[in-house]
Image: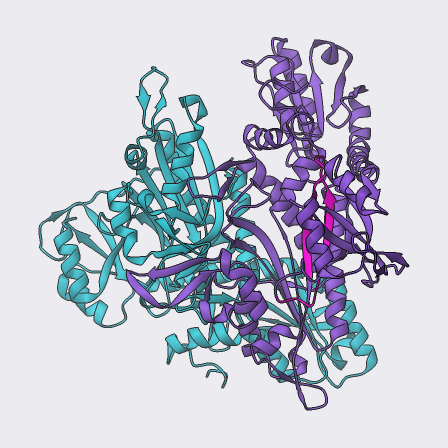
Chain colours: A purple, B cyan
């Protein structure tokens, strides 16, 4: 049963999602249509994601930098697929400094064009390659229908943009990025998913190939968690960017771009929460532990709770809640709603025995620990919770992944429980479009080996038209 | 004498400044008028500033959050002085998602209005105060004349925005912020300056009082390094924001805002650089130490230089330069240009004696150390360089601070060496405007105690009109 202040996750998933975000103070609607305010608790989660991913990025040799938020309209127009993909959703500045601009500026929906213009200026020879740059910033894609964290007109992300002397080197970076995202989702956010390559119709506007990590959400819909694009030489050609190659001939650099956004927080909320609110994996939780003083107890209990907090906070991101103007039940609900992985309760009984009562957010299990025992075991308990959450999400995903050998079966699944569907598809975009139109399911990806990009070849018949097919694709209704 | 690839700092300061930025690859001009690209080396400096200041901010109890980049035009119009101050330099979005907007959106020049609208929604009672929020973001102020780092149409900064139940509590935060900036400038950036309060005409549009840190640059002009604003109840009243006070009556919250931007990097470049390029204080240097292998030496020297680098890089942010395709002189110049505080040269002689040759960027002093000695003394050498740079900038500032007891004297100083001028001013805006018109000098601030905001009262005569004056103000030509 849901707490009275939030909707039930099983009964009304969509209301539950919004309630959790608003009540746990992760984010709020803003006065600007489709843009949200990320409140301190939500932003602290984003900072943990940034810290984790930024280290992976820097350790791999990519540097951070910053490029202008505005893109001259003519730049966006240079790559044809790119402009077709983004121009319907741009926000356009027409006035600045009190004057009408001669050339309109687009608020960046992504930064390929402005970055590659600079790369062109900075390079003469193959020796100036690779260029390995990432930026953490805000981008704007004006959306008709928005959804907190999942689809907002402005969002925060990182966009990595690298340029290389060879195709092979560029592809290594494409797979490195995909691997870094899989690492972040699995080891930080405890979210299981499927890595793969997008179909032609679902790939990024301007890319040769787009790789993705697709996660199944509790309502049976799929969330695209990131993208890593092989851009080939498309942008180099559109910008007339060549460098002198090893052989002395002009060389169009090979490029890739890759991004992960605040949308990941939407996945985190949906993937682990329950009727009591948010459930945060310890590695990404802004507060891993909360020490709750049972109110109305004696001075010595207060002191003992402070002692416990002091010891715990030296090793873990912790919060102390000694409030006397809230009941114990209210306090428990509050920290459950906020998804803190471990609650440590301290009352008379605990103080007398120099013990603590530990409650796991993920299983609601209560454990009594002696003080020294707590200090020895808390780290591994947090690790266990982290692993358990990933395991649970994997179990859910596997249980809700279906094989559809006929279109009847396919439609039945999409009409009922939804979830992931593995099905042969002939790779004709027409079949893909018809399946989408009739069932709402889109090709999420063709699962691949994340280090080589290779997909398993099989022999089968397209689930829609019955023609020969060599790959089993992953289908689902997307967010 | 300047290195041939950059102008001389003493002979042509303005060209030197631009040359250093472009050649050391700190930043570059972008295709968008007035907006710059911050390249990896410049951005790494910004990341060090963020790391230092963010810790001060968080330790003081302020949380980070994120608010939309767009502000509905009507919001900006709510506070009259505020809109008058900012509307001439706004960039305005009129189209989004392919449609003309009903209400135009301004790209934030600062976020007071959008943030306080949300604060209003989040608070009912004095118990919901204080609100302590900061954000790191990009803002846009469309400038006619721009200058890399010092004045760009888009820049990066942090803006702290707090709201309190009492005036006293708000002022504590105003002075806390000023103190945090003084700390950052002095202990991280090694830049000496004067903290004080702005005159009525120089204060922030919408503030009751604006506090600042003013630094003297080598060309005798002053750089405003930050601002901390006492906003009184101005915005609360403009937004009709009240909470229930302790006495049950409506209370307009007291507010403050404070910011430090990428402009600080401009001060850092100007304050310490010399004819050889940039000079970075060790605390903010992305690379504190570079180990340079003398090219053309034997395999064992190469190995020894690697050993030195391994040992050094465990403790300090370090770079290893074993390049064989550049001469020793070229390598030395390159790292001097980039301002790395300590260069460690390793050649045949050093390898044989298991020594290193250390060269200080700030003094060009060469010191020979044994390997063990280096490891024992490098930390304190870096501290010494840090202190020396602050001391040198303080010495320069003091030597170029003048007392002007007559307007003749005042004009002579401004026509000659410029610098800081201490002079009595009657606090009549007319005298201030005339002084500016005739000499280009503006009131930079009235120096105050940074914990109380109190200024020294004296008896004197206005340097311009001769009327009674009680304060000696700091004047200079500003950037």
Q: Quadrant of residue B330?
A: bottom right
Q: Residue at x 64, y 22 (%)?
A: A306
Q: What percent of the width, then of the height, locates residue B407?
A: 14, 62
In the rendered image, the quadrant that contains the C terminus of chain A is top right
Residue farthest along the bottom direction in this orientation: A248
* Up-down relation of residue A85 to residue B293 (above or below): above
Q: Nearer the viewer, residue B136 or A369?
A: B136
Q: Is residue B259 magenta?
A: no
Q: Nearer the viewer, residue B114 or A341?
A: B114
Total tally of numbered discs in the picture: 0
Q: What percent of the width, then of the height, locates residue A477?
A: 69, 44
Q: What percent of the width, then of the height, locates residue B51?
A: 56, 50
Q: Is residue A199 left or right of residue B210?
A: right
Q: Nearer the viewer, residue A209 or B350?
A: A209
Q: Quadrant of residue B367?
A: bottom right
Q: Residue at x 30, y 33 (%)?
A: B233
In the rendered image, the quadrant that contains the N terminus of chain A is top right
Q: Is residue B293 left or right of residue B329?
A: right
- State which region is magenta: A206-228
* Up-down relation of residue A298 to residue B204 (above or below): above
Q: Is residue A217 magenta?
A: yes
Residue A127 in sight in this render: yes
Q: Residue at x 48, y 45 (%)?
A: B135
Q: Quadrant of residue A268?
A: top right
Residue B385 in sight in this render: no
Q: Nearer the viewer, residue A235 or B400?
A: A235
Q: Main secondary structure of the magenta part?
A: strand
Q: What percent of the width, then of the height, locates residue A228?
A: 69, 60
Q: Is residue A380 left or right of residue B407?
A: right
* Up-down relation of residue A393 to residue B278 (above or below): above
């Amino acid at each position: 049963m849901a707490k009275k202040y939030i909707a039930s996750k099983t009964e009304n998933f969509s209301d539950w999602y919004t309630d959790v975000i608003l009540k746990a103070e992760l984010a709020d609607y803003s006065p600007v249509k489709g843009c949200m305010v990320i409140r301190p608790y939500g932003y602290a989660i984003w900072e943990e994601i940034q810290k984790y991913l930024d280290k992976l990025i820097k350790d791999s040799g990519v540097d951070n930098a910053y490029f202008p938020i505005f893109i001259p309209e003519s730049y966006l127009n240079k790559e044809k697929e790119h402009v077709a993909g983004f121009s319907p959703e741009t926000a356009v500045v027409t006035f600045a400094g009190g004057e009408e601009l001669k050339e309109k500026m687009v608020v960046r929906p992504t930064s390929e064009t402005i970055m590659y213009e600079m790369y062109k200026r900075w390079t003469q020879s193959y020796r100036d390659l690779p260029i390995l740059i990432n930026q953490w910033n805000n981008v704007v894609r004006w959306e008709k229908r928005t959804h907190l964290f999942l689809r907002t007109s402005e969002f925060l992300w990182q966009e990595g943009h690298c340029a290389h002397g060879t195709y092979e080197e560029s592809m290594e970076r494409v797979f490195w990025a995909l691997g870094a995202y899989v690492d972040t989702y699995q080891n930080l956010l405890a979210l299981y998913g499927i890595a793969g390559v997008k179909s032609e119709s679902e790939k990024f506007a301007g890319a040769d190939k787009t790789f993705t990590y697709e996660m199944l959400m509790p309502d049976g819909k799929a969330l695209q968690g990131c993208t890593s694009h092989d851009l080939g030489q498309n942008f180099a050609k559109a910008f007339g960017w060549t460098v002198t190659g090893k052989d002395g001939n002009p060389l169009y650099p090979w490029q890739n771009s890759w991004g992960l956004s605040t949308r990941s927080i939407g996945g985190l909320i949906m993937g682990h929460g329950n009727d009591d609110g948010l459930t945060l994996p310890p590695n990404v939780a802004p507060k891993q532990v909360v020490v709750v003083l049972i109110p109305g107890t004696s001075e010595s209990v207060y002191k003992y709770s402070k002692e416990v907090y002091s010891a715990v906070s030296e090793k873990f991101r912790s919060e102390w809640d000694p409030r006397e103007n809230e009941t114990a039940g209210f306090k428990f609900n509050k920290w459950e709603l906020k998804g803190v992985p471990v609650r440590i309760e301290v009352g008379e009984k605990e103080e007398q025995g120099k013990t603590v009562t530990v409650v796991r957010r993920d299983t609601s299990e209560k454990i009594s620990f002696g003080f020294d025992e707590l200090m020895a075991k808390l780290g591994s308990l947090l690790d266990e919770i982290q692993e358990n959450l990933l395991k649970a999400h994997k179990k859910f995903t596997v249980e809700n992944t279906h094989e559809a050998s006929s279109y009847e079966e396919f439609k039945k699944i999409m009409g009922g429980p939804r979830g992931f569907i593995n099905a042969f598809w002939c790779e004709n975009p027409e079949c893909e479009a018809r399946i989408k139109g009739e069932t709402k399911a889109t090709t999420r990806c063709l699962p691949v080996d994340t280090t080589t990009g290779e997909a398993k070849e099989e022999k089968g018949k397209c689930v829609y038209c019955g023609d020969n097919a060599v790959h089993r694709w992953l289908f689902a209704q997307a967010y």
